[in-house]
Image (cartoon, rainbow, N blue to C red):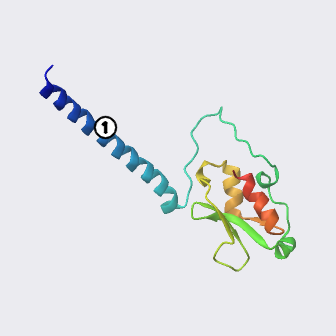
Amino acid sequence: MTYRRYKTLTIILLIVTVIALLLSAVMLTLRRGGLAVSGEPESPPENPATVYYTPKPAPSQENSETEESKAEDKFLVTIYRGGIGVFQPGKSVPVLTKHTEVYLLPEEDIKLLRDGIWARDLSHAKEILEDFD
């Protein structure tokens, strides 16, 4: 092969590589953008062998608190802009946020976060945030 042929093949391979990288970036952006636009997480892959693990059982269980006890609580942990936010009742700006890919969490945890998890105080809210690492 001559120098000219190597140069031509190199340019072709470079173009193919750049196109592949651009397509990958677009696909990742669309996948992430899908969560923010629709507000619904993507469904997990259909693999019955997949097992989810939640370190502490409290957030993965149904909230058994009554409406009266919720009024006494001070913080609400819920989904906020694709992550998790800790809010004081009546406030629209979170006190704490955690960038967690919510769509990667188990369906049970996503449902709990949609409904909201009530915390006694800020330290309890931080413990709940740690459970979603």
Question: Which percent across, then down, holds residue 13?
Answer: 26, 33
Question: Which percent across, then down, holds residue 37?
Answer: 48, 62
Q: Write down the quadrant of residue 63 in the picture.
A: bottom right
Residue sitting at the far bottom: 90
Question: Which percent across, then down, holds residue 3?
Answer: 14, 26
Residue sitting at the far top: 1
Q: Give the residue at x 68% y 56%.
A: 111
Residue type pointed to by label 1: Thr
| Above or below, comparing residue 124 to residue 100 in the picture | below
Q: Write down the quadrant of residue 1 in the picture.
A: top left
Depth check: 90 or 18 in front?
Answer: 18
Q: Write down the quadrant of residue 69 in the picture.
A: bottom right
What residue is shown with label 1? 17
Depth check: 9 or 100 in front?
Answer: 9
Question: Which percent across, then down, holds residue 117?
Answer: 75, 63
Query: Which element type, helix, strand or loop, lies under badge 1?
Result: helix
Q: Residues within 10 Å of mark 1 (few under 14, many from 20)?
A: few
Q: Give the residue at x 70% y 63%.
A: 115
| Above or below, comparing residue 106 to residue 80 in the picture | above
Judged left or right of residue 82, residue 2 is left
Depth check: 27 or 7 in front?
Answer: 7
Q: Give the residue at x 73% y 77%.
A: 89
